[in-house]
Image: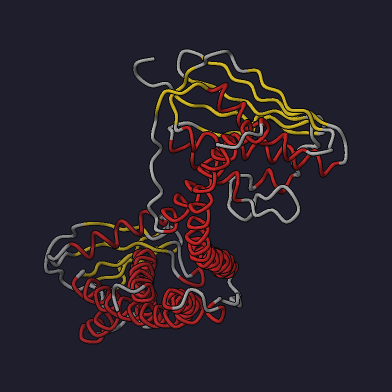
Amino acid sequence: MMNSLSGRFLILTTIFVMLAEILIFVPSIARFREEYLQNRLERAQIASLALLADDMLDSDLEQELLENAGVFNVVLRRDEVRQLMLATPMPQPIDATFDLREGTALVLIRDAMMRLLERNDQVIRVIGAPVREAGLLIEVTMETRPLRMAMIDYGIRILILSAVISIVTALLLFIAVRAILVKPIRGVVGHMQRYAAAPEDVRGIIEPNATVTELREAEEALRSLQTDMIHALRQKDRLAQLGSAVSKISHDLRNILTSAQLFTDRIETSEDPLVRRMAPKLVNSITRAVHLCESTLAFGKAEEPSPTLTLMTLDELVADVLDSERLAVGDHDVSLSENIPPMLMLRADPEQLYRVISNLVRNARTAIVSSGNAGEISVSAYEDDDNWWIEVADTGPGLPPKAQEHLFTPFQGGVSKGGTGLGLAIASELIRGHGGALELDRTGPKGTVFSIRLPKGDGF
């Protein structure tokens, strides 16, 4: 219990209330001492008035009056005449004199603390003003032991009362804290535990109902987190199901394409010049499709192969990409061009780089065709001391804001209507595998430019 929030709050409350009571205790003791001394002066004044009424008091009655007043002698000054009204032998000389007429708060507190700490019995002189203006001053001599014992008794009663107040206050605050803070916090923890046990169950989403502002903000933040996590888990589940389906389709498609490769050998022996010219491109396309199916199967097993980096000429690969896209352009007014330095050599995986550039060019061509306007697509490349750079630019309508926000996120960064958003996500992943980066340089009504950065590394 002491390690809980409410338990520690109970202890701290008790300590703080006790500290506050101690701060009150010191001036209270000083006030009690002052009232005690003032009371002795008043009793002594009453005893002296009895003597004024009858000058013939015997010694026994005088001793009784002094004992009732709790003093050894009484001096009353009336009309500038100092008179010893009552007297009895003192056991020891006077140790100190205290004038209550001039005592400030700090002086009274100091004298009270000194009296509590002084264990020896002393005789003191106390001077004060008579009540009801019955003279100029009155002074008495008295011993300090009864005063100190009365102060100790009063202090003990004050401390006991302070302890009771502290405990009652702490218990009330303990109950209030448990009701206002601890119970709602336990409710939040309970929702978190239930959500952790079944993160996809929407019944575990917390419904904010706290009246404390900070707790309500925590509940709202937890609800937002739970909602986002449920959506993320559902999306991951859909991706897993899709991956399983794609793996099955890729497996069968690979078998079909493998069979198609067997027929390309006969096509290459054809005497038709057009067929002989198109046959290598068909073979390359089927080969790439087979490799894509194999990579998809590996990806479905979480075994995406690392790129096989080889030195290659970029212009041949880009020419192959553009030739394939020209066939897809058909009757649309879309022109394709390249600006690749002759014999520019770079180190990359040819199949993966083909997929990346082909994806960017195909997306550009789809955007231009969808706009219904003429357009141009160009692929350029250059190098610096550290990197090779490939740019794919188009004069299309630009990317919509939603596509820019989730450009490289699967199933969220789709550009064209009906698109899955997988193309750019896969392309970005392939370039990251090379140690480079695929980035959107700019986009707008005048077109879009993507850049591919491939690091050179050592030896270049």
Which corner quadrant of the image does residue 297 belong to?
bottom left
Q: Residue at x 25, y 79 (%)?
A: 153
Left or right of residue 389: residue 421: right
State the residue in front, 282 or 342.
Answer: 282
Residue under the point 43% across and 73% down: 196
Nearer to me, 19 or 43 = 19
Q: Residue at x 60, y 43 (%)?
A: 424
Q: Give the percent coordinates (x, y) of residue 295.
A: 45, 49
Total numbered labels? 0
The location of residue 233, given as percent across then percent down, is 51, 66
Q: Quadrant of residue 460?
A: top left
Q: Residue at x 77, y 41 (%)?
A: 367
Q: Position of residue 288 (x, y in %)?
A: 52, 42
Tell me: residue 54, above or below residue 283: below
Using the rendered image of the protein, determine whether residue 48 is visible from the camera's viewpoint. no
Looking at the figure, which quarter contains the N terminus?
bottom left
Q: Residue 400 vs residue 308: left or right?
A: right
Asked if residue 378 shows in the view, the reply is: yes
Please, is residue 374 above or below residue 27 in the view? above
Name the residue nearer the viewer: 49 or 201: 201
Closer-to-camera residue (11/233): 233
Where on the picture, by quarter, is residue 369?
A: top right
Above or below, 61 against 341 in this view is below
Q: How is the image coloured?
A: secondary structure
Which residue is outermost to the front?
A: 271
From the viewer's perspective, is residue 87 above or below residue 381?
A: below
Q: Is residue 51 left or right of residue 371?
A: left
Rendered location of residue 449, percent (x, y) = 68, 29
